[in-house]
Structure formats: C-alpha cells, structure tokens
Image (cartoon, grey):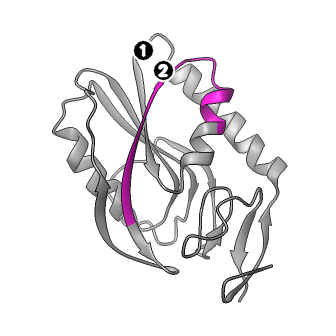
Amino acid sequence: MKVLDKEFEVMMTQEEIDSLVSDLASKLDTEYQGKDLVIVAILNGSFIFVSDLVRKMKLDPEVIFLKYKSYKGTRSGEVKVQLELEDDIEDKHVLILEDIVDTGKTIVRISQDLKEHEPASLKYGTLFLKPDCYNSEVELSFIGKELPNKFVLGYGMDYNGKGRSLNELYQLKD
C-alpha cells in the first residue's frame, strides 16, 4: 500500500488489534476496580485506540485528551505541547495512554507535567511499544504488544497526517 511517497505492508490485522485492546480493557477493569480513574489520552494517534478501549471496559473512566507532538515525517524529534491539561486530576488515579511508545521522550515530558497536579497515582500504558529504542526510566504498567523498531501507521497512527483511518497496522517496507 502506498501512502504519500512511502510503501507500507500489513503488520497486524484488525482482529489481532481488537484482541489486544480487549485484553488491555480487562486488565484495566481489574486494576482500577473501585477507583476514580481518569484516562489521559495523548493525541493525535491514540484517539481510535482509546475510543475502542473505553467501550470494551466495564468501568466508566473519565477521558481527557492532551496533545503532544514528537514526530515529523518518520522521525522522532523534540517533544512539543500542543494541548495542555485543563481538568482537575488531583487525588484521582490517572492512566496516561499512548498509541505507541518508542524512545519514551513524550512519556517523560507528560509525566513531568502531570505530577505537578498531584494525582493519587500516575501510571502509563501503550498499545504498542518499541523496546529496542525505548530509553526512559518511566515504567510502562500496561503494554498491548511489543513491536520491532519499524515505522508504523494505521489504527490512529499516521505518516504526515495520512493513514490514521486504516483498520490494520502497517509497517514501512524496507
């Protein structure tokens, strides 16, 4: 499949992704049972994942969206805040969710920003993790699946704004 100037191939089917999301929903329901949970979803990539996830959960978490950007094209760079926290998370159990974590720079920045708001707890989760390039001390409590260090798109993730609506996960062809 061609997106803009790059060729991509299927890495994971819609059914495989759905199974990962269902498993994460079950784990979160168990972990946060009886707690006041706030999910902080990081835009733009996580909106499809988080939408599917919360609809599979038995709990009814509050969902907040923040926007941090670190990618330009296929490369990760400086983390920039584009939409800041405006909600009260003090004394609430906060779970930051990303679509994908690679270097961990965004997670570190978000962690610094949200700790100032004194949540009861602060944990991190991601649908996908690229462990070969993860370089952070921040512990990820919930991981859907580890991926090789390849550029991916689909299921909310994009290449220069394109490909987010694809139901499967695609990887950049070598």
In the displayed structure, 26 sits above or below 99; it is: above
Could you tell me the amino acid type at mark 1?
Lys
Which of these two is toward me, 147 or 58?
58
Residue 6 placement (x, y as % from top left):
68, 87
Query: Is disc 1 in contact with disc 2, using a CB cutoff of under 8 Å?
Result: yes
Q: Would you identify the image quadrant in which residue 70 lies?
A: bottom left
Residue positioned most to the left: 116
Q: Would you identify the image quadrant in which residue 71 lies?
A: bottom left
Which of these two is toward me, 165 or 7?
165
Q: Which residue is mark 1?
A: 35
Residue 98 placement (x, y as % from top left):
49, 50
Could you tell me the amino acid type at mark 2?
Tyr
- The residue shown at (49%, 23%) is 61
The secondary element bearing badge 1 is classed as loop
Which residues are drawn in magenta?
Answer: 52-69
Q: Which residue is mark 2?
A: 32
Residue 102 placement (x, y as % from top left):
48, 66
> In the image, is residue 57 part of the stretch drawn in magenta?
yes
- The residue shown at (31%, 28%) is 121
Residue 126 placement (x, y as % from top left):
52, 49
Query: Quarter holding the C terminus?
Result: bottom right
